Amino acid sequence: MSSVTPRPYLEVKDLTVRFETDDGVVQAVSGSSFSLEAGKTLGIVGESGSGKSVTSLAVLGLHRTRSNAKVTGQIWLDDQELVTASNEEVRALRGGKMSMIFQDPLSAMHPYFTVGAQIVEAYRIHHPGVNKKVARERAIDMLARVGIPQPSRRFNDYAHQFSGGMRQRAMIAMALVNDPKLLIADEPTTALDVTVQAQILDLIRDLQAEFGSAVIMITHDLGVVAELADDVLVMYGGKVIEQGPAIDLFQRPQHPYTWGLLGSMPRMDREVRDRLTPVKGSPPSLINLPSGCAFHPRCPYAGRNGDRSFTDIPVLTGGAHSVACHMSAEERTKIFQEEVAPNL
Amino acid sequence: MVAYLIRRIFNAVLTLLVVTLVTFGIFFMVPKLTGSDPALLYIGKTADKVALDGIREKMGLADPIMVQYGKFLKGLVAGRDYANGPDVTHCPAPCLGYSFKTEQEVTPLLMDDLPVTFSLALGAAILWLIGGVATGVISALRKGSLLDRVVMTGALAGVSLPIYFTGLLASAVFVYWLGWLPQGQYVPFLESPADWFVQLLLPWITLAFLFAATYARLTRANMLETLGEDYIRTARAKGLPERTVIGKHALRSGLTPIVTIFGLDLGSLLGGAILTEAVFNLRGLGYQALQAIKGNDLPVILGVTLIAATFIVVANLVVDLVYGLIDPRVRLG
């Protein structure tokens, strides 16, 4: 490449994912761009249907098996472009250089194969020369590393014989068995007990430190993001509406939707009688997005002082902390300090 | 596991006992209630009083119904003697009595029919299992394509058309019109495997078409459901090639429910395929049952019913045991 600075490990440029359905074209992701360095964690936050899972599935090339999906833009992983790559090239990377942890480990594991066999399978597909015995040892070693007691015995168990937390650990073992340099975790703690959630997050953080992988943490839980992420991407209606370093984003959130997310998060230091303030309304239809700023129908500040500029689609401001909103930075800062921050 | 097996076998025997009770009750009590006389049926309309009393004595028809039932069960398990003074006929176990029509023992009569029915059922089962599952899988993988629509329309026809229509149509086309297949008789396998095969080909295809249609629809639905499962996405995310994803992960779950229905279908077919056997003039259990029904031959009807019920009960048991082996989530016990 011509640029002097090395490309980040993962760089996504202007990614668009569309699904053609009987009801119309679902614009699941429209022009999102982000990048991620090795060893760093990117949190992607948003409501259901905001495009966060679709984005990650696009990186893994998992939309390729759906004939109605259309992916455009660029995805660079370790200097290899994936959108235009062949199915076989992407398949060889899947589970190898990049792998994924899914939300519900019970449904994400095959019910008829033992957990051990599924890990062995994942290992051997990327290490064709390895015999079964070595692969088995590798799988047991991985089970031990993710903290599963008696790994050589649990190797022969089925997913339904594991507890929820142990199952997610096994899923993580399977995802990491080939030392991936990019790990995508799609709401890895949503289906788990609260007591287990923290353990799993700790595990992911420890393993990341050990393996030096880049991690994309997809979640709707800002608490998880605050704990793990270096950078945050906030998505709404298939678009990135705010992105920046996690510290900045939590201290000086810029987008009214981000304010809404923060306001709907329970906090220990808040008075019990204070009610959570949900973001009013419901997520937009991806077939028929609101014109202009997709968030404007739910935005309490849209059209204030007679400003009708929300009818145009806002663009990201650019820079380290970037936001897509019509209001000027001064305006937003003023509103945040006077109206939003006191209630957070 | 052993305890489960013993309990299941005990249950199976109990079920069969209830079947004997019900069938015996219907076939030997109903004549009593309606005033028809089994002794008369044994001997024929012109029998005189002495002969009738003699047959009543010998067949135990004068005994109370529960005694008769007890003797019937004893005959099934240990064989029984029909005796009227010095005139003794021994009927070895499992004794199902004597046909009203031919005065032959029912058991060997039905045993002679078994190979025909078995040949028909097993051959057809192999055909429909392979054909139905294969078309179902292909349909699922090509969902919405022209091929899928053609196959599913064909399957709908297969499910809806009765066997006496498809059977006669197939005979008309392949035997009488095209002359590709002989219109003949069943040839035992041991006599000539080639003739056995050729003679059974049309009945197999006809019967298999009916079942294959159901299996294709079922397989298609199962596969489509399985392909939408999270663990299929996981398999792809691991980097498995598509043929492994479909051929190993999807088929493994998509076909498991087929085992259940296959076992039950096969079990009930082994008890006789009345329509198919009648259409193709195959002298199997189903054909025998049809003749018995026409001729009011109660012991034969009872015998066929019992055999059919036994196959169904055994098939159920086998299916449950097999399911415990192929689905690790099923616990036997």
Image (cartoon, grey):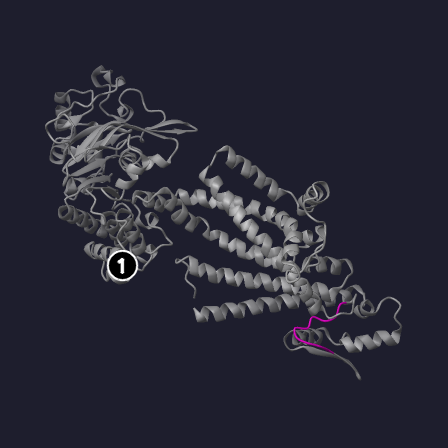
Residue A181 screen position, x and y as percent: 19, 42
| B310 or B150: nearer the viewer | B150
Residue B153 screen position, x and y as percent: 57, 37
Left or right: where B100 falls relative to A167: right
Name which residue type carries label 1.
Lys
Numbered disc 1: secondary structure: helix
As displayed, is residue B285 above or below residue A80?
Answer: below
Q: Which residue is mark 1?
A: A133
Left or right: where B266 falls relative to B51: left
Q: Residue furthest left?
A: A4
**Residue range (magenta):** B90-99
Q: Is residue A231 magenta?
A: no
Quarter where residue B192 is shown: bottom right
Main SS class of the magenta portion in the image: loop
Chain letter for mark 1: A
Looking at the image, can residue B181 be seen?
A: yes
Quarter where residue B300 is shown: bottom right
Picture quarter with the C terminus of chain A:
top left
| B190 or B214: nearer the viewer | B190
| x 46%, y 37%: residue | B142
| x 87%, y 76%: residue | B50
What is the crowding at mark 1: few (fewer than 14 residues within 10 Å), some, or many (at least 20)? few
Label tally: 1
Picture quarter with the N terminus of chain A:
top left
Left or right: where A89 falls relative to B177: left
| A233 or A128: nearer the viewer | A128
| A158 or A196: nearer the viewer | A158
Looking at the image, can residue A344 be seen?
A: no
As displayed, is residue B214 above or below residue A154?
Answer: above
Residue B178 screen position, x and y as percent: 69, 41
Residue B248 screen position, x and y as percent: 39, 49
